[in-house]
């Protein structure tokens, strides 16, 4: 009898020994194993639970077609589609509790798709020769993915690579045993923010929403936090969202890697989740500390927040562009959407006397928002600042109205 089962995915034609070693580590700790082969050309030393033919078939293709393509990238994308489809289906059927995937660049490419196909909370471990590499763009990462470098293991087992493989095997089984699934006893309000020195509304809103019987989950809008927020919204996991920090959208438009994917501000609307939206910190533009600044921003002063991130500000026309993008994305919403426009400021550092104070830029943004937000999306304007009590009061007024008329389900 085993308590948890782990799905092991890899190219068994070239990495059979390494994958079998991880399976033996999991079994030695009392876990169960389901194996999936994503090979194309060769065969495993012994049959896998999910064969390469099963994987290709789940992609609506075949191993014969993958080989006939004559291109390894095309072939592995077939396997990625099939593996993702099967993993999602099997997890929904309760056939495994966590996944560990082994690979070089090819296997890692597949692994990223498989992990994104699985819900938040399912343990996902990738053992890769390119773990944490800049080759991996942030928007390919699932919100709760775990990676470990596959050191010294490109070809064959040795004591160095066994260290990585055994750690991954123990970690995924331990995570599957330890993970606390979402209780589902209270409806959840998803909220975006940054640190409380910049955006403070959560300090006012969280206790008020909890008093109304809602759990509040606050996501740090610095890329991965927004990805997690969007992932849960895509799955319909929120009763309502208070999407009040949108720098990831501005960063996406500016070409920064500090973003949360092309679908930012789309998933709640696509799922019909009621949205209260505000433009917190949408005046800032953030770049990774290591990232070269695009030429169009090269003449602006940048502040190094720390060694990981540096920030500057959008100009008036760029802020108008962000307003138009907000309107375009919200116009696609299938559920209620209400924008709160705080004309007095959208983050703590844009108050008078602070370094981001830009009344002309704020005025341009507010003017554009008034012009582009159209029914059925609603717009409320307050004279105050996003961190003022008046902003929190207006958000709660909208929330309570939706609660009363059944737009938000308790």
Image (spheres, rainbow, N blue to C red):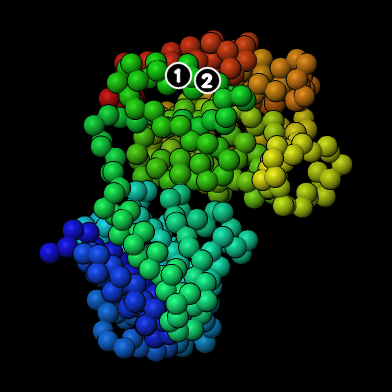
Quadrant of residue 325 within the rendered picture: top right
Q: Badge 1: how crowded within 10 Å, few (<14), some, or many (20+)?
A: many
Task: State the residue at coordinates (70%, 23%).
Answer: 349
Q: Is residue 338 above or below residue 296?
A: above
Q: Which numbered disc covers residue 382?
A: none
Camera-nearest residue between 399 and 305? 305
SS assignment at label 1:
helix
Q: Which numbered disc covers residue 201?
A: 2
Q: Is residue 164 above or below residue 362?
A: below
Label 2 near label 1: C-beta < 8 Å? yes
Camera-nearest residue between 21 and 282? 21
Residue 379 in percent (x, y) is at 54, 20
SS assignment at label 2:
helix
Residue pointed to by mark 1: 205
Residue 331 in percent (x, y) is at 52, 35
Task: State the residue at coordinates (12%, 64%).
Answer: 1
**Can residue 305 be spotted in the picture?**
yes
Task: State the residue at coordinates (62%, 25%).
Answer: 198
Residue farthest along the left direction in this orientation = 1
Q: Badge 2: how crowded within 10 Å, few (<14), some, or many (20+)?
A: some
Residue 342 in percent (x, y) is at 61, 18
Q: Is residue 28 left or right of residue 168?
A: left
Task: State the residue at coordinates (63%, 10%).
Answer: 383
């Amino acid at each position: 009898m085993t308590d948890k089962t782990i799905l092991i995915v890899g190219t068994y034609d070239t990495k059979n020994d390494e994958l079998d070693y991880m399976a033996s580590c999991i079994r030695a700790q009392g876990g169960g194993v389901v194996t999936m082969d994503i090979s194309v050309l060769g065969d495993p030393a012994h049959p896998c639970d999910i064969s390469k033919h099963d994987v290709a078939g789940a992609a609506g293709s075949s191993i014969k077609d993958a080989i006939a393509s004559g291109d390894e990238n095309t072939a592995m994308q077939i396997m990625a589609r099939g593996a993702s489809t099967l993993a999602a289906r099997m997890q929904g059927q309760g056939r495994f509790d966590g996944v560990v995937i082994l690979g070089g660049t090819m296997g890692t490419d597949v692994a990223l798709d498989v992990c994104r196909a699985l819900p938040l909370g399912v343990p996902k471990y990738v053992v890769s020769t390119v773990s944490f590499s800049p080759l991996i763009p942030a928007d390919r990462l699932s919100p709760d993915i775990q990676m470990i470098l596959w050191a010294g293991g490109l070809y064959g087992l040795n004591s160095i690579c066994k260290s990585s493989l055994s750690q991954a095997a123990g970690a995924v089984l331990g995570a599957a045993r330890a993970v606390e699934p979402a209780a589902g006893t209270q409806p959840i309000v998803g909220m975006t923010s940054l640190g409380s020195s910049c955006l403070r509304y959560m300090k006012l809103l969280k206790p008020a929403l909890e008093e109304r019987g809602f759990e509040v989950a606050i996501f740090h809008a610095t890329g991965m936090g927004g990805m997690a927020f969007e992932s849960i919204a895509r799955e319909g996991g929120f009763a309502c969202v208070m999407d009040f920090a949108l720098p990831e959208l501005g960063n996406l438009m500016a070409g920064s890697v500090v973003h949360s994917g092309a679908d930012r501000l789309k998933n709640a609307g696509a799922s019909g989740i009621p949205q209260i939206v505000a433009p917190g910190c949408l005046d800032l533009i953030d770049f990774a500390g290591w990232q070269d600044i695009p030429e169009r921003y090269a003449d602006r002063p940048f502040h190094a927040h720390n060694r990981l991130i540096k920030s500057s500000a959008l100009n008036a026309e760029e802020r108008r562009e962000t307003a138009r993008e907000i309107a375009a994305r919200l116009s696609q919403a299938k559920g209620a959407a209400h924008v709160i426009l705080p004309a007095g400021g959208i983050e703590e550092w844009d108050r008078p006397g602070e370094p981001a104070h830009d009344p002309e830029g704020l005025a341009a943004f507010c003017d554009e928002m008034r012009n582009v937000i159209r029914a059925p999306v609603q717009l409320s304007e307050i004279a105050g600042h996003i961190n003022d009590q008046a902003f929190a009061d207006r958000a709660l007024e909208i929330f309570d109205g939706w609660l009363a008329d059944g737009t938000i389900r308790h």
